[in-house]
Image (cartoon, rainbow, N blue to C red):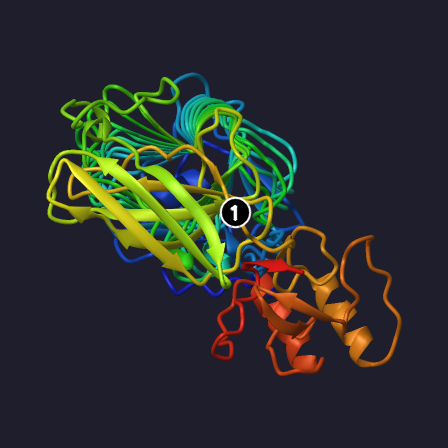
Amino acid sequence: GPGTNTARAGEPVVTRADDPTPIGCKPGDCSLREALEDASGGQTISFNIPGAGPHVIKPTEELPALVDSVSIDGYTQPGASPNTATAWQTGNASMRIVLDGSLAGPGINGLTIGGTAVLIRGLVIQNFSENGIMVAAFASGTIYGNYLGIDHTGSFPAPNGGSGVNVHGSETAVGGRSPDERNLISGNAVDGIQMNGEGPIVITGNFIGTDVRGTAPLPNANDGVRLKDGSDSLIGNSDPGAGNLISGNEGNGLTLGGPGVHGVLVRGNRLGTAGDGTTPLPNSGHGIYIALGAFSNTIGGASQPNQNTIAFNGGDGVSLAVSAKAKNYLDPNVTHSNGGLGADLKDDGVTLNDLDDPDTGPNDVMNFPVITRAEVVDGILEVEGTLNTVPAPFLPIFIFANSECDPSGYGEGERFLGEDIAEGTGPNYTFEATIEEFVSDGEYITVSASNPESTSEFSKCEKIVGAPMGTARTWGDVDCANGVSPIDSLKVLRADAGLGNTQPPGCPGIGDEVQVDGVTRIWGDVDCSLALNPVDSLKILRSDAGLPFSQANGCPEVGSPVIVT
C-alpha cells in the first residue's frame, strides 16, 4: 500500500528536497545530506516531504556514504509503494523520491555504500556522472526496489554516467525473489550491474535493460551484467521470482570476464526476450559471454526451472572467448534464434572436431558429438551417434529438439528432451538414446556433450525421420499467442460458461479434443481433469504470475512446450 512514515524516535526523517549547507537534522527540518551525516548503525533514513511528489533531490556535491547497518527507504515517503507484480510482469511501484545528479558535478556517484549490512530501497537514482550506487571496497549491502538510470515512471532513460550498480565490496545482494525487491536497472552509460569485488554477489529478480513493462528496450550502453570478479556468485535461481530479465542491452546480456570469476551459477534468467519469454527483445551482443580466464561456471540445468532462456540475441547464445578457461558447464537451456551459434567455443563460429580432441583453450575446445540417426519408431524417439574425445569417466550427451536449424547447419538447443551417457573406453564413444518426449515432423535434433572438464558446442542438425505431423504450442497458451497470459484465463472461463471465443486461424478451439505429445487432451483443460473448469483458469493465472502449483502426474506443466496434432 502507499507509504506512511513510521520513523522511530531519534531516527532521521528527510522533510525537504533541497540541499542546503548541513547543520544537522531537526524535527521537521532535515535534508538528505543531513540525514546521511547524522544516521548511525541500526537506523533507517525515512522520508516525509510535503506534497504529492515525486520529490526530486538534486545534490550539489557528493553525498556522505552510508555507514554500517544504516538503511535508507524511499517507500516510507507518503504516496510511495513498492512493486507487487509477480515475476516477469509489468512493475507497478509508485516511486516518489528521486535523486538526480545533474547538479552534482563530475566524478560523483549517486549513493555510496561505505559500511556493511547497508540497505538501499525505494529510490530513483538518475543523471549522476558516475555510478548510480557504488559499493566501496570491504563494504556490503542490499539493494532492493530501486530505479537506476531511468525516470520515476520506468519508461524514459535518465542515464548515470557509469553503471547502475558498481560493486567493489563483497556479499552484496541486488534484487530478490519477492516482487517488492525487484530493481529496474536500465539506461546507464556503462553496465547495468558491474562486479569488481571478491564476491559473492547475488543478482535476482531484476529487470536489466528494459522498461518497467519488460516489453521495450531501455539499454544499458554496455552489458546488462558484467562480472570482472566475484567467485561463487549467483545470477538468477530456480525459485519463483528469482530469475532476472536481462534484455535490450547494447552489449552482451551477461559477461563473466576475469580469473576471479569462478563458481558462478546462472539459472532461471531470460536473456534476449521480453518478460513473456517468447517475444524478441535482443541484447545486441551475445546472450552470455565468458572470457579473460573465467572458469568453473555453470549456465543452466537439466530441470526446467534451472534453464535460462537465451534467444534472439545479436551474437551467440553463449560464447566463450579464446581467453576463457575450462570447466564452464553449459548445462541444458532454452537456446534458439540467436544471430550466431547456440554455443561457440573460441568466439569464431563452428569449431570443427579434431582427431582424439587433444587441443586446449576455452572448455578445452571439446569435440561435439556426431548424430548418425534420429528416428521415431513406434512413438519413441531413438537418437544414435558417436563422440571422439579424450577419455573421461562420465560423458553425458544432452539431446535437444529444434523447430528449425541454425543457418550454419549446426544447432542451438531449443527444447531439452533428455540425456544419455556415452559408452566406450575412449577416445571413441557411442550413444544410443531412447526418448519418450513427443517430437513432430519438421523438427531437428541436436546434441552436445559434457565431461568433468567442459561442455562442447552443439552438433550438426539432424532432421527427425518418422515423426508425426504436429505444431509446436505452449501448454496453457490457449489462444496460441506465443505465451501464457491472463487473456488465456479469461477465454477458458468464457468457454466453461458456454460463452463464445474467437481463436486465431490454426489454433484449436477451446474445449476441442487434440493430441498433445501423443496423448488425447482437451484444449484449455490445463490440469488434465478431462473438463474445462475454473481451476484451469486459476492455474493459468498462477503460471503467468510465476507462482507455484502442482499438476497431475503426466499432465504438461503450464508454460511448457508441447506438440499438438
Report how many numbered discs are placed on residues in the image. Answer: 1
Q: Label 1 amino acid?
A: Val
Q: Residue at x 77, y 75 (%)?
A: 493
Q: Depth check: 508 or 515 in front?
A: 515
The one of 293 and 29 positioned closer to us in this rendering? 293
Visible residue check, residue 203: no
Residue under label 1:
465
Residue 52 screen position, x and y as percent: 68, 51
Q: Is residue 70 left or right of residue 232?
A: right
Visible residue check, residue 393: yes
On screen, residue 129 above or below 72? above
Left or right side of 1 for 192: left
Q: Position of residue 532 (x, y in %)?
A: 71, 80
- Residue 82 x %, y %: 55, 57
Q: Is residue 122 above or below residue 162?
A: below
Q: SS for tag 1?
A: loop
Please identify the residue farthest to the right as the structure is shown.
500
Question: The C terminus is located in which quarter?
Answer: bottom right
Name the residue rendered at 16%, 23% in the picture: 360
Decide: is 95 above or below 369.
Answer: below
Residue at 52% from the left image edge and 26% from the top image edge: 339
Rendering quarter of residue 155: top right
User: Relative to the observer, which residue lies in front, 341 or 398?
Assistant: 398
Name the quadrant of the N terminus: bottom right
Q: Position of residue 510 (x, y in %)?
A: 77, 69
Q: Residues within 10 Å of mark 1 (few under 14, many from 20)?
A: some
